[in-house]
Amino acid sequence: AQSVTQPDIHITVSEGASLELRCNYSYGATPYLFWYVQSPGQGLQLLLKYFSGDTLVQGIKGFEAEFKRSQSSFNLRKPSVHWSDAAEYFCAVGSNAGNNRKLIWGLGTSLAVNP
Amino acid sequence: ETGVTQSPTHLIKTRGQQVTLRCSSQSGHNTVSWYQQALGQGPQFIFQYYREEENGRGNFPPRFSGLQFPNYSSELNVNALELDDSALYLCASSLGDRKIYEQYFGPGTRLTVT
């Protein structure tokens, strides 16, 4: 079955430090991969997406992610975290299983930023 | 360009009641997907509408139903509310075909069932 795993439930980093959030997926074909961010009480904002081509994708707010097929991973990175980056981050994969074209989500990683 | 909007923002209902949630899709988008997000969880797919037809459904009972209108706005209806229906309900719009997975979300409706 298709699935997304985000191994880290909570991460705390200091402002200005680098960040890497992990995402592993299980999907038979070439996946469509996404990272979203959700601030408390808010909807989900698309940070970046991978469909094909260059495996390093750039997104909004200074985020990037790298698709590694051999590791079934799509980790999110940011070189220098800002306090405003504190939020919940979700990784998702596009799935067409059972003829349902939907997003399958990880459980999310909660990011806290220390001043 | 207008983003995805949802109404109401918050809603409190009693077990057994019925509720209707509304979503206006982003300008130019013809597909609407609905998700349920319980506290501390990732979103779960409820169903999707494409050009006014249901285009896929997740593992939710029939008391969850929906509509899409000619302007591509959409409604989610839930009958016979249960306590476990308390969640954030998210609507997402997208273009069809390959872009169907590139989904843009509204702020959500927080439903509390007491």
Image (cartoon, rainbow, N blue to C red):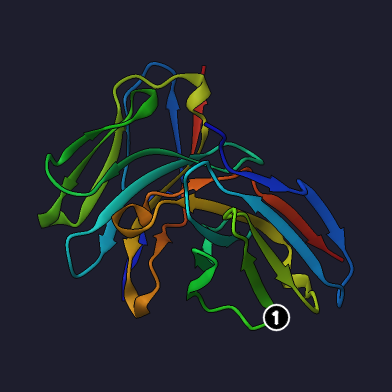
Residue A14 figure quarter: top left
B114 relative to A22 in the view: left or right: right
B9 relative to A15 in the view: left or right: right
Expressed as whole percent of the image width and height from the top left, the position of residue A45 reads 49, 39
Residue B9 appears in the picture as rendered: yes
Residue at the image position 12 percent from the left and 44 percent from the top: A53
Residue at the image position 53 percent from the left and 52 percent from the top: B92
Residue furthest toward the bottom? B62
Residue at the image position 42 percent from the left and 57 percent from the top: A106
In this rendering, the count of numbered labels is 1
- The 10 Å Cα crowd at callout 1, few under 14, some 14 to 19, many 20 or more, is few
A1 relative to B49 in the view: left or right: left
Expressed as whole percent of the image width and height from the top left, the position of residue A83 reads 51, 20
Q: Nearer the viewer, residue A7 or B8?
A: B8
Up the image or down, B109 lies above or below B86; here it is above
Q: Nearer the viewer, residue A35 or B30?
A: B30
Expressed as whole percent of the image width and height from the top left, the position of residue A88 reads 51, 41
In which quadrant is the N terminus of chain A drawn?
bottom left
Expressed as whole percent of the image width and height from the top left, the position of residue B113 reads 82, 65
Where disc 1 sits, the SS reads loop
Up the image or down, A49 lies above or below B112; here it is above
Q: Amino acid at mark 1?
A: Arg
- The residue at which mark 1 appears reads as B63
Residue furthest toward the front? B70
